[in-house]
Image: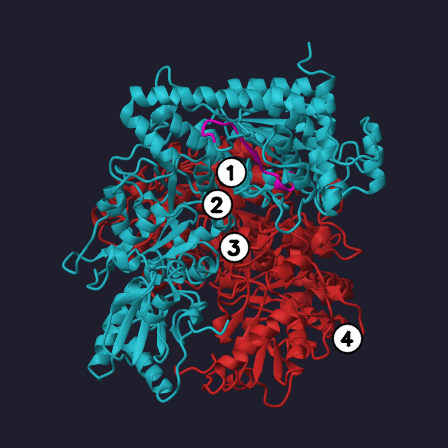
Chain colours: A red, B cyan
Amino acid sequence: MSQFNETDKLAVNTLRLLSAELPSAANSGHPGAPLGMSPAAHVLWTRFLRANPKNADWINRDRFVLSNGHAVAMLYSLLHLAGYDYSIEDLKQFRQLGSKTPGHPEYELEGVEVTTGPLGQGVSNAVGLAIAQANLAATYNKPGFTLSDNYTYTFLGDGCLQEGVSSEACSLAGHLELGNLIAIYDDNKITIDGNTKVSFTEDVLKRYEAYGWEILKVDNGDEDLDAIYNAILQAKKSNKPTIIQNRTTIGYGSLKAGSHDVHGSPLSADDMAQMKVKFGFDPNTHFAVPQEVYDLYQQRLTTPGMEANKQWDALFAEYQKKFPELGSELARRLKCELPANWDSFLPTYTPKDSALATRKLSEMCLQSIHNALPEMVGGSADLTPSNLTRWKEAVDFQPPSSGLGDYSGKYIRYGIREHAMGAILNGIAAFGANYRPYSGTFLNFVAYAAGAVRLSALSGHPITWVATHDSIGVGEDGPTHQPIETLAHFRAMPNLHVWRPADGNEVSAAYKCAMESQHSPNMLALTRQNLPHLAGSSIEKALKGGYVIEDVANPDIIFVATGSEVSLSIDAAKILAAQNIKSRIVSMPDFLSFDRQPEEYRKSVLPDGVPILSVEVLTTFGWGKYSHQHIGLDRFGASGKAPEVFKYFGFSPDVVADKAMKTVAFYKGKEVVSPLSKPF
Amino acid sequence: MSQFNETDKLAVNTLRLLSAELPSAANSGHPGAPLGMSPAAHVLWTRFLRANPKNADWINRDRFVLSNGHAVAMLYSLLHLAGYDYSIEDLKQFRQLGSKTPGHPEYELEGVEVTTGPLGQGVSNAVGLAIAQANLAATYNKPGFTLSDNYTYTFLGDGCLQEGVSSEACSLAGHLELGNLIAIYDDNKITIDGNTKVSFTEDVLKRYEAYGWEILKVDNGDEDLDAIYNAILQAKKSNKPTIIQNRTTIGYGSLKAGSHDVHGSPLSADDMAQMKVKFGFDPNTHFAVPQEVYDLYQQRLTTPGMEANKQWDALFAEYQKKFPELGSELARRLKCELPANWDSFLPTYTPKDSALATRKLSEMCLQSIHNALPEMVGGSADLTPSNLTRWKEAVDFQPPSSGLGDYSGKYIRYGIREHAMGAILNGIAAFGANYRPYSGTFLNFVAYAAGAVRLSALSGHPITWVATHDSIGVGEDGPTHQPIETLAHFRAMPNLHVWRPADGNEVSAAYKCAMESQHSPNMLALTRQNLPHLAGSSIEKALKGGYVIEDVANPDIIFVATGSEVSLSIDAAKILAAQNIKSRIVSMPDFLSFDRQPEEYRKSVLPDGVPILSVEVLTTFGWGKYSHQHIGLDRFGASGKAPEVFKYFGFSPDVVADKAMKTVAFYKGKEVVSPLSKPF
């Protein structure tokens, strides 16, 4: 017997029409995918999805990720039907400046789990969401107290499956046996270039089977609601992640159904009208929603979701009594608060401490703070012994069947999959419960994950990249492994902290910022080689992003440097001092933190009247922001012993001092305006 | 009967020991993979590889790509044995500054086909090399004149297989039925984090079968030379790409064999000594090569390779007589020369021509020049109708069995696979025959391919990105699709031309640079929206990278702008002119071309004494290079109608004029030093 009746069919067609109305009203957008995916969305949302539209952030809600984010008109329509804070008027404002319904799903919107649009990201975020759920459950669930058991559902299309980031993430998801992850593949055979035959003829299900996924098929996803229902039901029983290949027709109902013309352009008025007639709607009415459809969503989703949330609240209240320690920890995490005084565990240093690589100092930091921060979840893209990202007692996050760890483990072996790692970090952070995920790779290879880093910054996920081997200091591995443009790339990205600490105190500052960030990701560029601890550094000063680390009265020149070049600049300044040239040294570990300081402070560090010289063994590109002249490396590096490579490129105190002297001479008698002085 | 005798075994062990000597001498490097892969390398190089060590660039040589580039010590050893210009002394200089044997394979080195090290790139380059071969063969081969029939062999490890870029590339290779591509997977179960069990438990061969590849296995790749031989032989018969899973022991022969400790650190002296004894060598002799091993390589590779090259030369001489037109075209291409006067087909424009989007002007350019440039091979990552990258008469590069094109086709449907597209471009360019591959995607999504773009720039491949939708001009698709940091990222990369043309003449200039570049890649950032043609532009001027497009005597301010903001600046200058403020307008379509001009020219464009204001609707990061003050967009964009979004962010003539007035007032009476004035 069918699970579905005429009201369900009406609801499916309502969802289709509503989703197609949005692009028509905006004269911009993507009607094709929603018309094909509405049946699956309806089944999922009215029969499976556990969510409370009146408390969208409830931690034990099921997550719904629309990986093919261009189908967002359907998501807004679903959110409207389910009773989230999206009115018909909001839907009519689709893609208008300042509306609640922008052109792709954005994380900050109610009911939107992650920002999608760039293909392949959503499904990879979903892997992160599923990892976080498994970890939360293994950490806090107790017999009789199943606080966490939600599923992560994701819709994805051909594009998401072709993107390498999803291949990486799904291979890992298979390895991790994430049975809480269910992907519904909208197999409509159409992409922008036409039929998938032109470029995408692989056997997708076989590939996913090779990854260790459960594979299921729905032959008629346009109409067979029961088949969709049964597939999801079966998927929920699997202890592996599941992909359901759902055969649909893009633009179902439209005159252009089955063609790529219906993908990214609104339907014509005539086409809309005939489709309404076809579906039994009035062709002259727009944005129509029959009351029985609202009632269905209320009865099937909203009411049960609110009830489930209420029961969960009661359960959690009981839990807090029975397990006061874990209970209060989780309660704190759900408020997105860090433990009081967690930062007292951050190490501090004086110049008497041994010189160490900042990657080593990072390891010491993690070792010191991990106990205080149960929300910290680490990992590396197969460079653990090089990134030094694993604290000694760490347990691996692994499927129990592997014998290598369990789901309460907090160290993730990402494999050599940087892009997926970035997207998974975003998913873990988006899960909530104050997760603070960090990851490790070489700085140069964070570029592989640029697509995910951008979405971290755009969404404001508080994730952290531990990016070691930050310069030609890599040495023998040579130019393929030596970053040049990398910091410029990431500093140019809005809302991303890019730290390049000069010593131990600055490493601790970077971690303090990273863990306390609520709406910004952080990246830590760390050295392979040892650096001395500096007399003028402190956590507090470094948190300002840029500060005077050595000073004199009336300097002739200001050095501004980061990381390994701060001590180099100090050494160069000593040479200058012997020639009566007075230097101020500014350490600038993080541009973003500095830019967020009051103007008065910033101008006190880099005032008018003194020439400013930057020193950083990476591209000079972007340093014009703070300095008049720049010492850097505007070519690719070279393979050789690190000290020799540094010397070869002129990164030695004498060469830097010589350039500084020339700078002082050049500006002598000229009026010097600080780059921070702005007329507008 | 075995194909192999005792001399082969001796040669394998010689190769193993030689490869392990290099890291020991350097006290840096990776002995593990060479020790495991030497048998397969020996079989391939002495029984299959067609190459002429005395003419390394012979076009019909087989290509050998070491995708796991950290095993480069083995490659240098092979090149030495085969008689390329690598002496034992060169091997002893492994990883030393300035040596011919750097830490990873670099494209400019003799016998090295592509730069590898960043994992996943090499195998993806190999797909490009195989595409180029198929295209060359389909274009020039004639009955009795098989000018091109080489194979592309690639070695790869677990890392290469985990990286998403290789998933993308190999899925496409399967679709394209590239039977000329043979991959040998060094399946040693070890990565840096330990056993592959920690993160990589998928069924690799099943995945490749799903991609449409032939799959083969060698169970004992450490010793069974015949099995390796037979697998390669069988692979050569397939009309699909083949992957051979070759089970080996990392660090075979070492005391640390089978452990990740042997991956990235030189062996101890004791370990080296015992291994030499084990292999029947003198433990006290270093870099030993028995004469019979040299003789074997001479007899099996060098002599036949030289002979094959000689026969090919004779065949090609005959071909040129019989097919004078195609023959001279190929001869020209083999000299890496463009056709004379090809650039006469570049369109030029005057202000009377209709305003058009630069993406449309790009399409017109391709339409005009494609006939003159048979070496131009296009494509898009499934955005053909948006990127406008396909000329009307283009034939798709497709397997003939598809019925959608053939291998002589010059338009590649990359699918939604930006990273693979970038790596494939590099492979096509590295093939030789003057290939000029270009590709299309949205500018914002070139970031997905950042890893490959970096290798284009590092290797100097003359490839081109047609990167449309270059700003918030994207409009409704919103911040996920609107580049902000992207141009800064790529401008900061050494050796990459990043064009943002302002009109039709500048588009033609960008194409002229792109096609004539021999050692630099190009990127073209193009608008979705229409732009007017400007009175002051010309191909010749734009080729300088930056030039004065509108001028007055004694300007009060200099605007420097790119793309859509050049006409905006001209409009702002008109407002200023009404208030007696005189403006020079500089168009700066490509930083790199400008930087390569003589200082005198550059200073004539951006002289001392006048405040310079940049205007570009992307990040201001990096503009300090040329301008004192900057109008830009240092936040993420917004979804809305493009003109409204422009206005919202202050990109209108009146707002720009107002900021310019403030800039003039700010610098009044101050001595203004051009950012181009340098003391060192």
The numbered mark, 1 or 2, whose residue comes first in the sequence reads 1
Amino acid beneath label 4: Pro
Label 1 and label 4: CA atoms lie apart by 48 Å
Q: Chain of mark 2?
A: B
Disc sitting over residue B124 in the figure: 1
Question: On the same chain: label 1 and label 4?
Answer: no
Residue B61 colored magenta?
Answer: yes
Q: Nearer the viewer, residue A62 or A598?
A: A598
Label 1 and label 2: CA atoms lie apart by 9 Å
Judged left or right of residue A88, residue B291 is right
The numbered mark, 3 or 4, whose residue comes first in the sequence reads 4
- Mark 2 highlights which residue? B419
Judged left or right of residue B453, residue A618 is right
Disc sitting over residue A351 in the figure: 4
Judged from this view, the residue extending furthest toward the top is B1
Picture quadrant of residue A240: top right
Q: Nearer the viewer, residue B574 or A271?
A: B574
Where residue A371 appears, as percent x and y from the top left, is 77, 63
The residue drawn where x is 67% and y is 70% is A502
**Disc 2 crowd, CA 10 A, few/some/many (<14, 14-19, 20+):** many
Amino acid beneath label 3: Ala
Where residue B67 appears, as percent x and y from the top left, is 58, 38
Label 1 and label 3: CA atoms lie apart by 19 Å
Amino acid beneath label 1: Ser
Q: Is residue B443 above or below residue A571?
A: above
Q: Chain of mark 4?
A: A
Task: Find numbered disc 3 in the image and state the secondary structure of the residue it sits on.
Answer: helix
- Mark 3 highlights which residue? A450
What residue range appears in magenta? B58-71
The residue drawn where x is 17% and y is 58% is B350
Q: Chain of mark 1?
A: B
Q: Pointer 2 and pointer 3: residues touching (CB < 8 Å)? A: no
